[in-house]
Image (cartoon, rainbow, N blue to C red):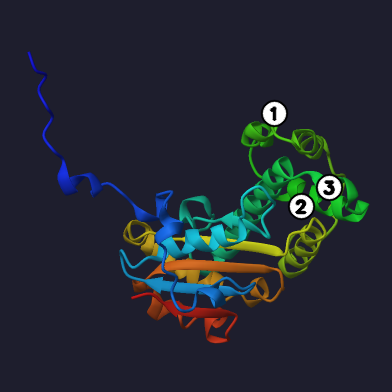
Amino acid sequence: MMEAVPPARGLSVFGPLRAEEEPWLGECFVPPAEFDIMAEANSIVVFGPTGGGKSTVCRMLAAHVRKPDCPPSFLIVEWQPSPSVWEPAVGFESVPGQVAHIFDLCAMEILRHLALYPGAWATAPDRVRQMLTWFIWRFLRGNTAIRAADLLEGKPGCSIVAQILQTDMEEDLLPSNDWRLIISEFSKAIQRLGLRGIWVTVDMAEQWMVRESSHLLPALTSFLSTLPLFEQGGFAYKLFLPVGFRPLLLTAPGLDRRRFAAFHLN
């Protein structure tokens, strides 16, 4: 007796695919004309419609600096702006919460980098190790042992991660509210580890705009109006945002005064 043959799925097999998540993306990616400019050590904001390729370009920029079998050239920090983690979550009052969120993600990402690529840590000057240890101690939130659990075993630098997390700093090395100074010193410290700088990437899907736009858009506009956050070399933002954000965000001083290069994907 022959077994029943399932019906052919045809083109429906492609229904659930998201191109930016597929392993073959790099083989068929056609970069936009401005891709080389987007890949420079500068802050950019890319606006585009649904399905316009924002996520694909964001992923390929990351792949551009993450080569197989070697450390990345930039520390890539993925930030999903979320008013639910800011207090308060409106206007300029939200900026300290947004900065704290970004610094927390930076602290976690430098720990991950050291766990995977520990070689430069041993030869880094004491002041560099002290600065990075302080940054992690000061800005990493929550239960650090739980958050870093996957880095504490089976990684080349797991002992470094454990040592950093066990260090209890007695005092702040820098004023915790001087964001310009902190960004500058953090950037210089990671450059001594062989990294060129930090990219904070934002790939904001349209569903986020619908769900949180009442607080998110004003908060993000206020963030992009806080110029000291965007005046330090080595610390750049790569923002990929819905086209509906464009009219208001283009009025923010960070874009209006060319701290960001703005692009539009059709």
Q: Mark on residue 153?
A: 1
Q: Position of residue 106 (x, y in %)?
A: 66, 53
Q: CA distance from mark 2 to mark 3?
A: 15 Å
Q: Nearer the viewer, residue 23 or 104?
A: 23
Q: Position of residue 33 (x, y in %)?
A: 45, 79
Give the mark nearer the N terminus: 2 vs 3. Answer: 3
Please identify the quadrant where the C terminus is shown.
bottom left
Q: Amino acid at mark 3?
A: Trp
Q: Residue at x 11, y 27 (%)?
A: 5
Q: Is residue 168 left or right of residue 143?
A: right
When the figure is inspected, residue 249 is found, relative to residue 122, above or below; the finding is below
Residue at which label 3 appears: 121
Residue at which label 2 appears: 135
Q: Residue at x 11, y 19 (%)?
A: 3
Q: Amino acid at mark 1?
A: Glu
Give the mark nearer the N terminus: 3 vs 1. Answer: 3
